[in-house]
Every structure is written in C-alpha cells, then in structure tokens.
Image (cartoon, rainbow, N blue to C red):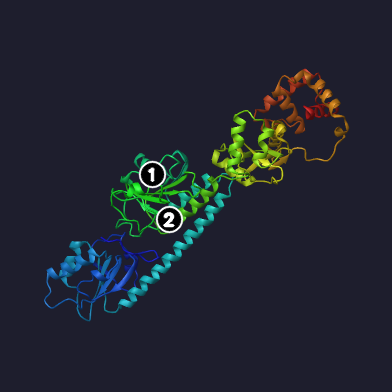
Amino acid sequence: MPDPAVPPTPPVPLDALLARADLGLRRIAGPADPAVVVHWAHTSEMADPYPYLLGGELLLSAGVHVPDGAGAGYFDAYVSRIVAAGGAALGFGVAPVHDTVPGALVEACEMHGLPLVEVPPRTTFSAVARALWQLMAQARTAELRRVTEAQQSLATAAARPDPVPSVLQQLARRLGGRAVLYGPEGTRLAGAGPEPGEEVRTALAKLAEVVRPPSPGHLRTPSPGHLRTPSPEDPRPPSAGHTRASSPGHRVGSGPDAPAGSPGDLHADLTARPSSASDTVAGVRLVAHALGNGEGFVLGTATPQRDAGDHTIASVAAVLLSLLTGERHSGSGAGRSSALVRLLLGAAPAEVAPLLGGDRWRVVHGRPDGRAAPDPVTASALGAALGSSLVDVAGEVVRVLVPDGRAVERVPGWTLGVSAAAAPRDWPAADTQAARALARARATRAPLLRHGDRPTALTDLVPPAEADAHARALLTPIEQSPALVDTLRTWLSLHGSWDRTAVALDVHRNTVRQRIARCAALLDADLDDPDVRMELWFALRRA
C-alpha cells in the first residue's frame, strides 16, 4: 500500500463520524476496528478511482459508475482498487441511483476488509465532508491544547532544582510511557515512567545508537535491522531528519527524499546521522532523539501507542534536555582543557587561573533541598544557574567555582553557602568558608548564606598576628581533633542549639552533646559563660 500524503491535521476515527446522529451513517460491512481513521473525504464516480486517491480517504459514491447487471466480478475489482490505493472506507449513497446497497458490493467489502458505510438519502455527501472537517478541527484544537499544556509543564520542570529527572517525569506522564536519557557512551543516565520489558529496553538502547553522532575517529555503524520505511499503521511521512526503523536494506537518511535500498547507501551516510529514529517492538512504539548539543546525549521514549502531538511534545523535551546537558562556558573550552592539562603536569593554581577567565573566584557549596543526592546532570544544572561550568559533585554537596564579578543569587530548590572572593592560592580556604556557610544555612533554614557579610567588628581592631597567636594558644587542647573544633564552632554559631547543630553536622544530637562536653573538659572552661563563648568564638574565627 502506498504511503498517503496526509494533511497537517490529525485524522478522525471512522467511529467518530458514525457516531454523528445528524448524519445517520451506518456501517454494513468490513471490520469494526476502532483504529480505522479517515484523513479526508473524496467523492468519485469513476469505475477505477485508484489514480485519484492519495490514501486515507473516505471515498463517497452513489454508484453512478455501476453498469446494469454488474456482478460480483465488477465489485470485487472496484473494491480491490480502493484498497490498493489506501482508501480508509467506502461510503455508498442510497438514492437516487440505487434503492439499496448492492449485495455484491457488501460481499466484496467484507472479503477485502474495507469498511462499507451506508449513507441515507437525507444526508448529502457535502454534509459528510463538512462533518469530517469539523471533527478534524476539534481534534486539531485538542491536539494543540495538549501540546501547549505539555510545553508549559516541561518548561516548569526544567526550572526545578532537579531539572533532568523532572523533565523526564513530565514527558513520560504526557506520553503515557517511558522516557530515558542516554549518555554519550550509551549508559542510561536517568529514566522515568513504567519500566518496559527487557526486549523493549534493549531495542530502545540500540535505537539510540542509530542517532548518536559518532565520536571523532570512531564511526559506529547502525544495524540495518533497526531501520524501516513507514508502514500503513504509521501513515504520516517522515519529517526532515527523521528515520524510522525495522526493515533491512534502507539507508539512514536525513530527510523524506533520501533514496532507499541501493547498495552503499548505508555506508555513504555514516557521518550524517538522523536526528531521530523510530521502531516498534512487542507492540511498543520506540523513538530516539539525538540532543542538539552534539555531545552524544540521546532521549529515548517507549509508548504503547502513538497519539497526535507526541512527536512535538518529545521534540520540546529534547530541546530542553539539550540545553540542560550542554556544556556551559565561563571561558573557552580550549582554555579549560589547557588549564586541566597544566594542573595535571604540575602547574600551580595561580598559573592556570587566568585560562579560566578570571583572577578571583568564589566557591559555592550547594545542597538540594530534597533527600536525593545530586547527580552530575543535576549538578551541571546548578552550575548553569550560577553561570559556571566548573562544577564538582562531592557526595551530597555540589561545589561550583564562580568568577568574582558574577553575582551569586538564590537558586530555587537549593541551599547555598558562598565564600568570600579569593585568589587561586586561597581557594582551599574559600572552600572551607563555603562549607561552613552551607552548614549554617542548612541549620538556620536560609536559602543562601555568604561568608563574611558583616560590617567591621571590634575583633578587626586586633593585630592579625596577635589574634592568631591568641587563638592557637586557646584552642591547643582540641586542635588535634577536627571533629571537636567543627562541632564547637557550629554549636557556638547556632547559639548553643543542640538540634540545629546536629542538622548542620549530619550527626545525632547526642553526639553533639558528647563532643561539647569533651570540649569543655579539654578546655577546662564553662561553656555556659557568655564571656567564655565570646573568647572561643573569637579564636575559632581565626582558626
């Protein structure tokens, strides 16, 4: 059956047209299949309508072409030509030529599996066509509304603190299936929606390889068994850059005009991968979209059926994921690569910092408000929000290096601690400042805290050398235990709150009590005395 060139409107189920009481249509032969859809209506009284059909039509005829005494042979040939042309159904008008639908026509339609609809005398063919266009307009409006709502929900998901999982969850919900993000090496980075069977999972992973751009010097040859031409069940022609999969002998083309089946086609197109590909396995429709960042990320979807607007919705998700997974530059990629190589070869941070785009930087520690630990993609999204690609995932905390000239503001869904601006030689100290600011921010439930955001204090009037010497002398009994020093600092900063200190340090409140009691014993000090607390706080700020 030829592939019909369909209009840019969604098809209408034949059952929806039959349900119109004002038309009075009645199916009298052929399969009662709810999957039968009509793309348009066409009236013809030709004995052989094949040359005038594109496929997907409800062909309307009053039987003017039927000769007197026509038998089963005539109707068999007539119906077979409609089926060969891809006609969706035949509507036969009763009166003025025929009082009833010819019995031989009913038998021929039944034999060839073509739905036959009786059109009563009171219903004109124009009324049938008008009703069809009305149903198409309603379907198109519903499709546009569905796509618009999906776009809004996907955009909202992309703005969440965990944007990639959120986008995948929304996409899976909107498509009613499974959505998976594959990394450049084919690893499954994230997924959402019902998990399909092993056969479908394997097929979707293989389909992702069809669209993944080959890395330099290493061209992957897609399996020809995963490339197919459109089928009657999927009548829409492929858009530019869209390749369907499953029948050997067809090239991976970049558009609907790409020739198929000739030897050497597959080899000739290895470097021009399609932007998307589709297949059907075990009754599940699979689609793979190459993300536009060119870094090898692929979005895969597995849905039990194909609905109008699915491709548009998945394309929107692919664009958003391209932005979320793409590399963000605070300096040139070559500069960052050069900086990394020099560090690995022994250069000092101060020497490579100019290659990153600045001399002074702030260290930001971030922790997502949810319980889930951040993954590399979520960490990259935080870096993108802060305007930096220099991101590191350290357990449950994400560390970001941000140029001093770039403002660090609140990021919804994250708790942030920000260091003072520092030169490269002071980055380790800035890292400690950011960690302390984050701990205090989490304990006080503040979305963002900065180190050193305060006016000049009395302690600033003490000469630094003398202040450091005093701090070392005062804290000598506990300086060999970092846990005691950090606990005492956090406990004093939170005004002696056991619970908030436990939260900030991720320990049990009884552990905090034990450590503070140990500090009091080693320091031989009454920690309930405000003067003692003041002295210790002064010393700890110099430590």
Crowd band around label 2 with a 10 angstrom C-alpha radius: few (<14), some (14–19), many (20+): some
53 vs 514, left or right, is left
Residue type marked 1 = Leu
- Residue closer to the observer: 317 or 331: 331
Residue 141 placed where, x, y %?
A: 45, 66
Using the rendered view, name the quadrant where residue 7 is placed. bottom left
Locate the C terminus and report the quarter of the image it occupies.
Answer: top right
Q: How many marks?
A: 2
Q: Secondary structure at mark 1?
A: helix
Q: Amino acid at mark 2?
A: His
Q: Please say whether residue 180 is visible from this viewpoint.
A: yes
Query: Where is residue 125 drawn, in percent x and y?
Result: 30, 76
**In this view, 138 is above or below 171:** below
Residue 400 lies left or right of residue 112; in this view the side is right
Q: Is residue 419 above or below residue 14?
A: above
- The picture places residue 531, in percent across and down from the top left corner, at 86, 28
Locate residue 405, reporting x and y percent: 71, 45
Quarter placement of the N terminus = bottom left
| Residue 284 showing in the rendered view | no
Residue that label 1 marks: 204
Decide: is 430 above or below 15.
Answer: above
Q: Identify the residue position indicated by label 2 in the image.
A: 311
Q: Residues within 10 Å of mark 1 (few under 14, many from 20)?
A: many
* Residue drawn 65% across the image and 28% down it: 507
Spatial separation of the CA atoms under disc 1 and disc 2: 16 Å
